[in-house]
Image (tube, rainbow, N blue to C red):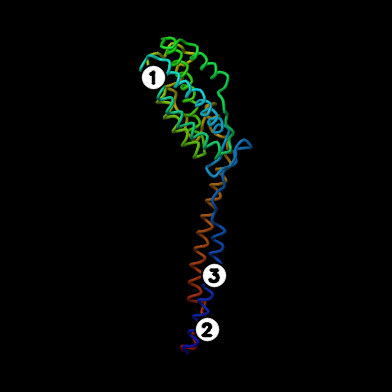
Amino acid sequence: MFTAVRGGRSTVLTRLAQVVTALAIICSLAVPQASAQPDFGPEYTQTQFGPMGPAGRDMLVKVRLAGLWEGPAGRLGLQKSANPLVKEAGRHLIDGHAELDAKVLELGRTLNVPLPNEANADQQGWIAEMTSAPAGSAEFDRIFANRLRAAHGGVYKFLAVVRTGTRNTLIRDFAKRCMEVVLDHIQVLEATGMVDFNDTEAIPLAALAAAPVAPASSPTTPAARQALPNVPSTQNLSQENESGGSDALLGILVMVAVVGGIYLWTGGRPRGSRSSRQ
């Protein structure tokens, strides 16, 4: 009698194990795998740090170019100015761009972005202006402060756009640090008292400062659409549908597992085990 009971229980447990194993396999196939990085288009390269797009590459190039002329401009400020505030600004420029230059070269190698090795024509012209201005003169101080303040203002706005829209974590972190350094440079340049804020061409007036910000989920302005990659809206819908379908399937599978287990443990026992006990 006991042999028959043990045999019946063994059969039930074997069947139950088979059902559980089959359900586990089905569930593993039903669970959605980690989604791949979205394809933003041919201009984007997939990296382990997130997609690398044109704005990220342009940022690295611009930061490298800035270091190629603003570091030397800082040294000219130390050498040629008699104004201690200009000299202080020069020290900030030298230190800040030494840090950013070392980092941008490292990121260029990591993200496979070619970087320039000399300043562009405009930047070389600004250095030439400072070099030609008499040492210790107010003319030099004005050229120094205004050329550098205008350049930093433009770069700061560009960095903010990249920081806001990039999906690459290395670019995001570097943009944040660049903004901190550039803002420091803007402040020390303005502290010289030589910046001409009446020059609205070099330092454009703030525009639409009080304009409402469009919701992040539905950018409506042209600037917002340019800052964010154009991802088809159907992508999010399909992900939601897949997630909802997978959840429903998992719920059904769990119910089947419970019902199957109860059946096998009660009504599914072999009749031989009952008669043996009788």
Q: Earlier in the sequence, mark 1 or mark 3?
A: 3
Kindly identify the amino acid type of the residue bearing the numbered disc 1: Lys
**Disc 2 residue type?**
Arg
Q: In the picture, residue 84 is in which quadrant?
A: top left
Q: Is residue 67 visible?
A: yes
Front in this rendered view, residue 10 or 119: 119
- What is the distance, in whole Å, between disc 2 and disc 1 at their CAs? 99 Å
Residue beneath label 3, please?
19
In 3D space, how far apart are the residues under numbered discs 1 and 3 (Cα atoms)? 79 Å
User: Does label 2 or label 3 sit earlier along the sequence?
Assistant: 3
Instruction: Tell me if label 2 and label 1 are in contact, CB under 8 Å.
Output: no
The x, y position of residue 207, in whole percent, is 46, 19
The disc at residue 271 is 2
Mark whose residue sits in front, 2 or 3: 3
Rendered view: 207 above or below 10: above
The type of residue carrying mark 3 is Val
Residue pointed to by mark 1 = 87
* Mark 1: secondary structure: helix
Q: CA distance from mark 2 to mark 3?
A: 21 Å
